Image (tube, rainbow, N blue to C red):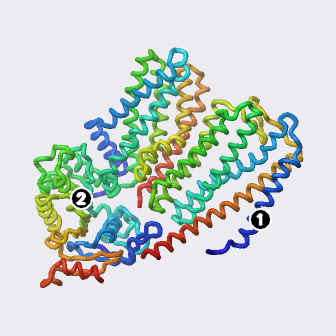
Amino acid sequence: MIEVKKLVKRFGMKAILRGLDFSVQPGEFVALLGPNGAGKTTFLRILASLSRPSLGSVKVAGYSLPNESAKVRARLGVVSHMPLLYPDLTAEENLLFYSRMYGIVDQQERITEVLGMVGLEARRRDLVRTFSRGMQQRLAIGRAVLHDPEVVLFDEPYTGLDQDASEMLDEVLRSVAAKGRTVVMTSHDLARAEELATRFDVLSRGVITASGTREDFKNSNLLDFYKKALEM
Amino acid sequence: MQARPVFLKILDYLSIIVLGVSTYLALVFAPTEAVMGDVQRVFYFHIGTAWVGLMGFVIAAVSGIIYLVTKDMKWDRFEVAAVEVSTVFFFITIALGSIWARPAWNTWWTWDPRLTTAAVTELIYIAYFMLRAGLEDPEKRARFGAVYTLLGGISAPITFMVIRLFRTIHPVVIGSQSAEAQGGFSMTSDMKVAFFFALFAFTIIFIDMIWHRIRLGNLQDNVEQLKLKVTM
Amino acid sequence: MKQPTPSFLKATLAIASKDLAAEFRSRELLSAMLVFSMLVILIFNFALELDVKVRQSVTAGVLWTTFAFAGTLGLNRSMAVEKDRGCMDGLLLAPVDRAAIFFGKAISNLTFMLVVEAIVIPLYALLYNETRIFQLEFLGVLLLGSIGYISVGTLLSTMTVQTRTRDVLLPILLFPVAVPVLLASVKASGGIITGAEFAEILTPLNLLIVYDVIFLAVSYMVFDAVVEE
């Protein structure tokens, strides 16, 4: 579903990503772990077609970036730590706007469905500015899956959420992944990532230094795996 | 540190020589203008600097377009060099014109189309430097800079045409003279020698300075690269 | 459930109507622009001592200065809304041509500016008993001038919100390149107020049209370059 080969991203002279190789099979839920400044967000922005690769090839959902980015964008949902929602519009209006931007046909039907999934049906006519951080983040996920994307990218979805909100988000994330979607999520919350993901990749100093599935560390835990990967 | 290329060295000496000769031609060789007297002698450098100033802005807009198409940073360095050198030359043009205007028009400044357009153009390119200063990413700086030189390059001639609707007293020494112009004169053949030599001299100096500025830009890049190597 | 991508026009209208819906609910931007406009006119009133004789020559200039200042206020705010909550990324992620984002934003910005003009002009007429500004030609010039100003302003505000010095930078970048559109508008609308011959206002009118066409086309072509990374 995602094929990245020898990806290099430079800002000016400074290389953030240095020859990164990465691939994800359909239906996988990959947690991208790594310290701050390792290039996780930059990498995700490239997968989301928001940033151009300096060198290397990137293929998402069978289309290469940046040349076929419009086709990729139609099959891609993105949730970042910012909500990407308009505070002066209601939940419904926000979703209606994005469904028009994605050319969705049965708009009302789909919006009701999505609002039900993220548990915000009762608040559909309320302004987003009155929502708590957790509700905004759930609505942001609803926005991202509105057009039923094949690939979903999450960039630190837990930023700024309290315990309760994080648990509710877990449920929503599970239901997003349950439909056979391919998911890539960056996080430095190892405990949450461990519960959700099927595969764990560590991004450090611009390359993937380790990759393991849940089965690979049955006896040890994710924290040991992560520490070892950073030492490499 | 690389040594200056031989041709650049030759150009440096040539620049000094032609500047000397042009000064001699303007201040000694050319006959004193009958009505205005010696102050008319600033005219030669006024036109010389104005010529290269305008040429530089056109070059900047063109290299901006080439940058936007090719995304090759060398065109960005070329554009910056052209704008920087031209901004200085254009300032000299305005200052010399002002010195001449004091006795000829009995004022340091008047809101004539050429003067106003020159002032607006200077402001555009000062704004250009402020725009660049506000951006960290060199690539973004190059893109935004290119877009802005393009906008400036298109708007300046329209500014001139618009202000001409108000009125003009600027003399036109080459081409047709408007009836309201004050301080015009016709050139004798010796004046023409000084005039054309000034154009030639400032073109040489302009090329020399642009070359130095591009070289400086390249060296700055090298320094950045070396700094990154040291810190890694 | 594979959806077709929306047409250019539909995406443009979706963006514009989203902006208008949000604005007509909060009215933050319009009220700021309006109050600011009235304050500018108040200051001009005393600074220029706008009596009957002075008004004859400066009405067009006062109005256009007011609209230009109020316009930067609106442009800054309208683009900051997109940038601050990451909504710009949301727009860029949609499978639409990026130029649709430019036209969508330009249409909503233009609407805000026209609404402000539609309120300020009758007020000005009322305050100074200046009915000559209710001429079809005058309103036409107002529209042409606003289109030119907003098209280059929308492009530049997209750039300035991405800089460190965002709010201060927009007028500094915008005013020098918008000089032609402002001066041509002043010249044309001033001519209409003083009842000049049509031939006299034809040249500034032509220059306005030329400016509008060129800058809309250029903005359309370079917009991609100011939003990508």
Q: Is residue B43 left or right of residue C26?
A: right
Which label sits in the foreground, 1 or 2?
Answer: 1
Which amino acid type is marked by label 1?
Answer: Tyr
Q: Is residue C74 left or right of residue B21?
A: left
The residue that appears at 17% across and 84% down in the rendered structure is A216
Mark-to-mark CA distance, 1 and 2: 64 Å
Q: Which residue is mark 1?
A: B13
Q: Are marks 1 and 2 on the same chain?
A: no
Q: Chain of mark 2?
A: A
Which amino acid type is marked by label 2?
Answer: Ala
Counting from the top left corner in percent of width and height, residue A63 is at 34, 69
Counting from the top left corner in percent of width and height, residue B209 is at 68, 60
Q: Is residue B152 left or right of residue C96?
A: right
Q: Up-down: is A102 above or below A54?
A: above
* Quarter the N terminus of chain A occupies: bottom left
Helix, strand or loop at mark 1: helix
Q: Up-down: is B169 above or below A103?
A: above
Local packing at callout 1 (Cα closer than 10 Å; few below 14, some 14-19, many 20+) is: few
Q: Chain of mark 1?
A: B
Quarter of the image for residue B19 reads: bottom right
* Quarter the C terminus of chain A occupies: bottom left
Q: Which residue is mark 2?
A: A144
Quarter of the image for residue C17 reads: top left
Numbered tag placed on residue C29 in the rendering: none
